[in-house]
Amino acid sequence: MAKKVVIDQDECIGCETCVELCPEVFALDSEGEKAEVIKEDAVDLECVLESIDTCPVECISIE
């Protein structure tokens, strides 16, 4: 079963750290306020793991 990248929208503060580190997986939503996953089945696991480690509110996970 494939792993899926998830952002807890209630916790996200829109700092854009994940977007800067991994733009092929994350982007800001249409309001520009919160990050969202644009590619759930991320190929570049390294940048996703770095995003998880650097998120200041720890709202990114892999399920």
Image (cartoon, rainbow, N blue to C red):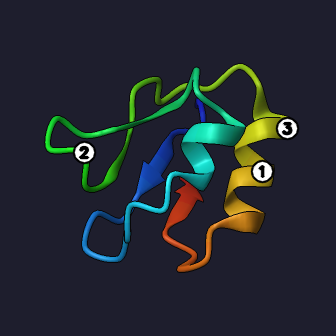
Percent x, y for residue 34?
30, 55
For badge 1, the amino acid type reads Leu
Give the labeled residue for mark 3: 46
Query: In the rendered image, which quarter contains the N terminus?
Result: top right
Please rate how many residues cluster around mark 1, counting C-alpha atoms within 10 Å: few if below 14, some from 14 to 19, many from 20: some
| Residue drawn 49% across the image and 70% down it | 59
Residue that label 1 marks: 49
* Residue at which label 2 appears: 32
Q: 45 above or below 14?
A: above
The structure residue drawn at horizontal position 71% and vertical position 19%, both measured from the top left corner, is 43
Tag 3 secondary structure: helix
Q: Residue at x 58, y 27 (%)?
A: 23
In the shown orientation, is residue 12 left or right of residue 10? right
**Marks 1 & 3, CB-CB < 8 Å contact:** yes
- Amino acid residing under circle 3: Glu
Q: Say which element carries label 2.
A: loop
Sequence-first tag of 1 and 2: 2
Question: Tag 2: residue type?
Answer: Gly
On screen, residue 21 above or below 63:
above
